Amino acid sequence: MAERWRADCPEAVYRSRDALANLRLRVRIQRVTSSMLFPDQLEERVAGEPDKGLIELDTLRRHTPSAVDDQEEQVVAWQEKLFSQFEVDLFRTESTCQSPLDRQYHRDIVALERAGGRRNQRIFTYTDYDRCTSLEEHTQVLTTSNKSSPTFLAERMANVRQRRHERPDSNFSRLVTWEPTEDFVKNSHVVNTPVQTMYIMADLGPHGKLGQKENEYVLCTVRADSNGVITIKPDFNYSKEPYRVLTNGEKREVWLLSLENASAAISQEEREREQRVYRDLYVRHRDYLSSLVGQDFEMPPPGILRLLVNGEVVSAKGYEYDDLYVHFFVELPDDWSASPPQSLSGVTQTCRTRTLGKDSVAFFCHPFSFEAFFRKEDETEESLPRWPVLYFEVLSLDLWQRYRTEGYGCLVIPASPGSHTLTCSTWRPLQGGTVAELRRFFIGGSPELEDMSYVRVPSTFKGDRLSRFGFRTVTTGSVTFTLHCMQHARAFVDAGVLNKRRQSVLDQLGGFSQQSSVHGVLEAFERARRRMREARESLPEELMDTSARLHTEPMV
């Protein structure tokens, strides 16, 4: 098979929810040669001279093929088998049939001959079960080299994908595919293969020499899968000019190819009925998914707030050295707890920096998550509890895999739910003198914190005032975090259903605490304004007149 389309032939991909059995393609080919147009031109030239040139014109007409042989039009259905002259000659004799598919083709050809012959002459098809449809992967090459050939593994994997088996055939000097049984051929419309292929071919040989394999050319390739995706190469012509097919040989004839979508259009009534069916199907599928999920969601016990944080260490920038990584952990204050299996610490991968503007930025995109539970033991306290704190340190690796401390930092988990992007600046301890800087540069030694909570308030500190006098630091870079916080508590649902006031600690921790406080201030202001209006209206008129006179008269 040869593909002789024009170089700019497009390949189109369509999606259809209709059955593939309703697909129809109208294929029309027409030969364009000088021998076909020359008799008409000669006839026009000699029309005014009836006594000259009639013998030569009749001679050319006798040697010119008929118009039927120069053009053909067929409407081809999906996986419809149209036999070529070569297949008719091959399968006419029953002794040459070796497989169930060959014998089925023999019976079909005999039935066609009894009915008066086949309706096609040059245009024929190769369906998905023919021998040639699985040979495309063996003939394709990925390079321009003439010596390239598929490996043994590539051939075996191609056969596995096509779900076929190879066997040698004595009639052909090539590999042919497994042939289905007779029952399989009869019921082939119920088979759902991953990808089905159909080739619309044409025998473009000279007149009287049809049936030779070297004259077969691919007009159109149609592929479809079970999801309704249809690939057609080349695409339909629509209003564009026909495609040109150039044949091999001495004459190098040119054929014009036209492709049209001949599928029957659906009526408006059927379209509406189909939409109703799909709508009912979607509703049933939604109800089915809802039944799998259920209506009862997991709720924390009463008096417990559940905090879920899905975070990401996005990037770090502004540091002195390259090959950075971040070590972080989460500290849970009093009244907070976490399930034992989960880890509250992590380390990112080592990342090289890239220059963006004036800064060197290392993009980690390292995700982390944790879940914590809050339970207030003493409900008499009115102060809000402390929130979990995320401590982190940025380190760098040198050529000998020795690390340096680049900076320390911390951030408090936001009290409001939602998405938050936070950029935290860092610092590192500074040891005075040139020796310390040389040690840091050559051997990687640098001052470190024994307790990373010293970045904020040390966990061992019990006093009232924390003094850092004499502790020298230097500002380094910054780290960007993205936090997605979710809060879950039974008190939120009860407050929303019962419309009660939020006064407990859990209510103040909720995502609507800020909104509730704003509404409370507005309601208090409205109540005060109403009382002032009522008090003013209840005052005597004499007092109102005296007050107004005092405001209007100038003071002496």
Image (cartoon, grey):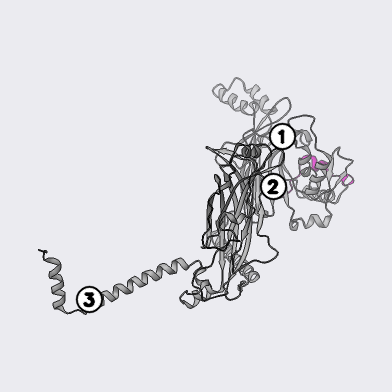
Give the position of the N terminus as an image quadrant.
Answer: top right
Return the residue at label 3: 536
Element assignment for label 2: strand
The circle on residue 223 is 2
State whether residue 263 appears in this view.
no
Q: Position of residue 494 (x, y in %)?
A: 52, 76
Return the residue at label 1: 204
Q: Is residue 17 above or below residue 123?
A: below
Asked whether, in this view, residue 334 is left or right of residue 400, the answer is: left
Asked whether, in this view, residue 152 is left or right of residue 310, the answer is: right
Q: Quadrant of residue 126?
A: top right
Q: Which of these two is toward me, 496 or 442?
A: 442
Stretch of the chain drawn in magenta: 78-97
Element assignment for label 1: loop
Identify which amino acid the numbered label 3 is placed on.
Answer: Arg
Element assignment for label 3: helix
Does label 1 or label 2 sit earlier along the sequence?
1
Identify which amino acid the numbered label 1 is placed on.
Answer: Leu
Q: Residue at x 61, y 65 (%)?
A: 372
Does label 3 or label 1 sit earlier along the sequence?
1
Q: Is residue 83 magenta?
A: yes
Q: Position of residue 479 (x, y in %)?
A: 57, 48
Q: Residue at x 69, y 52 (%)?
A: 225
Crowdedness of circle 3 by 10 Å Cα count: few (<14), some, many (20+)?
few
